[in-house]
Image: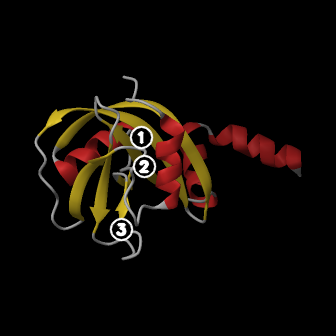
Amino acid sequence: MKRIVARAWKLLRGSLQWRVLWFTQAKFMIGVTGVVRNDRGQVLLLKHRMWPDARPWGLPTGFAVKGEEFAQTVVREVREETGLEVVPGRLVRVKSGYRLRAEIAYEARHVGGTLRLDGFEILAAEWFSPDALPEGLQESHARLIRAGGGPAAS
C-alpha cells in the first residue's frame, strides 16, 4: 500500500501535490509581535481596546496576511496601529501549540514617523523603560521585553 501511495504522489507533481496538501493539512493563522525599541532602549507598548480590561497593555501585534514576510508584518502592523516606522531585526520567538495559531516575534528598531493612533484598536501608545513596565502588561510580552536587551539590531 505504501508503494502505491508513493507512486501516486510522484505522479501528481507540482500544483496537484500542493492542492492535496492544502485539503489534508491544518491551516494556521500567524500572529506576529514586534518588540519595538527606540535609541534609548525604551520599548513601545500599546493599550489595546479589544484586549481584556485587566491586561490591555502589550506590544504591537497582528496577523500576517497571505504572502507577507513575517518581518514585514511587524512593519505594517506598527505603521497601521501607530503611524510609526520601524526596521525589523532578529527573530526572537517562534511558538506553536495554540490550536490553529502560531506566534512569531521580532525585535524592531524605531526609525521615524509621527505618532498617529488607530483609534479603533489602540487607546494609547507610550515608550517604557524595560525596568518600569506598566501594570496590565501581557506576561508573555513582558518576557519578550526582558529577553531582549538594548536597541534592536538592524
Q: Quadrant of residue 55?
A: bottom left
Circle 2 packing at 10 Å, graded few (<14), some (14-19), many (20+), is many
Cα distance in 3D space between marks 1 and 2? 7 Å
Residue 122 in sight in this render: yes
Instruction: State the residue position of label 3.
Output: 56
- Give the image location of residue 18, x and y in percent: 56, 46
Q: Quadrant of residue 56?
A: bottom left
Element type at marker 3?
loop
Cα distance in 3D space between marks 1 and 3? 24 Å
Which residue corresponds to the image point at 46% horizontal and 61% vertical from the top-left? Answer: 138
Q: Are marks 1 and 2 in contact (CB under 8 Å)?
A: yes
Element type at marker 1?
helix
Q: Amino acid at mark 1?
A: Phe
Residue 29 in sight in this render: no
* Residue 128, placed above or below residue 152: below
* Residue 124, placed above or below residue 8: below
Q: In the image, which disc is placed on residue 70?
A: 1
Which residue corresponds to the image point at 53% horizontal and 49% vertical from the top-left? Answer: 143
Which residue corresponds to the image point at 42% horizontal and 61% vertical from the top-left? Answer: 137
Q: Which of labels 2 and 3 is toward the front?
A: 3
The residue nearer to you, when weighing 85 against 67, is 85
Instruction: State the residue position of label 2.
Output: 32
Q: Quadrant of the C terminus?
A: top left
Cα distance in 3D space between marks 2 and 3? 17 Å
- First along the sequence among labels 1 and 3: 3
